[in-house]
Amino acid sequence: MKILLLDESGDHSLSKIDPQYPIFVLAGVIVDAAYAASELDERLRAFKQRLFGRDDLILHTADIVRQQNGFEALADPAFRAKFYTHLNTLMSQLDYMVVACVIKKYVFHRRYGTKALDPYMFSLEVLVERFCYELGNRRGAGRMVAEKRNSILDSQIDLAWRRLKVEGTRYLQAATLRNRIIDLELRPKRDNLAGLQLADLVASPIGRFVLGKPTREDWRIVESKFRRRDGDYRGAGLVVLPKK
């Protein structure tokens, strides 16, 4: 069985758009379930233990950048350089596939106005499709995991998932979706789930790339992990909307 683990970068609001980050990224990593529960978890814990002397830290991009919630040591330039070198090596070596949908919110809102779907829900549909394509025609071959946020947002995600199971997507029949994906589970950050932390780490480099900001080593690693069709990840692993 394979698992699609989801995390986002940026907020999904269309009423208030941050001009410094006018996009929404829903990123997912696809991993083998047995691998996620064994080697992936063990290697992330070993990484944290080696650098911080503890394995209960949650690798969260916002905390890493702000050097808070256990990442205060990153204020030291030498340690910060060591941290990113080791993290990039780990992300390069781990076995996972990346799928992501990026919504350019200004263009999205101008094009669709009040008919625009919530960016999270729209992106979820796109990633569910790519996950089903990757699973192939195998019954009960996949499940999805997303991070719990708050009761309102969690209810919205649950409703979106239920809608997809009943209505399908534009390119995927509901029966096909139900046949291939067992369920969508919401897990809190405190569970220290390795796959969710990996999804968090790939989301920001994707956002920087789409915004045209200077790329770093983490983007080159993520780019190499994208799902591909005929060697191309555009559309197969990375979907940027609206299309030109």
Image (cartoon, rainbow, N blue to C red):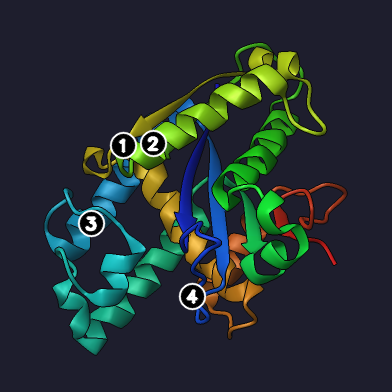
Label 4 element class? loop
Amino acid type of the residue tagged 2 in the rendering? Asp
Amino acid type of the residue tagged 3 in the rendering? Lys
Whole-number angstrom distance, CA of label 2 to CA of label 4: 23 Å
Label 1 element class? helix
For the question of whether residue 27 can be seen, the reply is yes
Whole-number angstrom distance, CA of label 2 to CA of label 3: 29 Å
**Residue at x 32%, y 40% (from the top left corner):** 193
Label 2 element class? helix
For the question of whether residue 40 can be seen, the reply is no
Q: Is residue 27 above or below residue 243?
A: above
**Residue at x 51%, y 56% (from the top left corner):** 12
First-in-chain label (2 vs 3):
3
Residue of label 2? 154
First-in-chain label (1 vs 3):
3
| Left or right of residue 153, residue 28 in this image | right
What label does residue 48 carry, if any? 3
Residue of label 1? 151
First-in-chain label (4 vs 3):
4
Of badges 4 and 3, the one in the foreground is 4
The image quadrant of residue 232 is bottom right
Amino acid type of the residue tagged 4 in the rendering? Asp
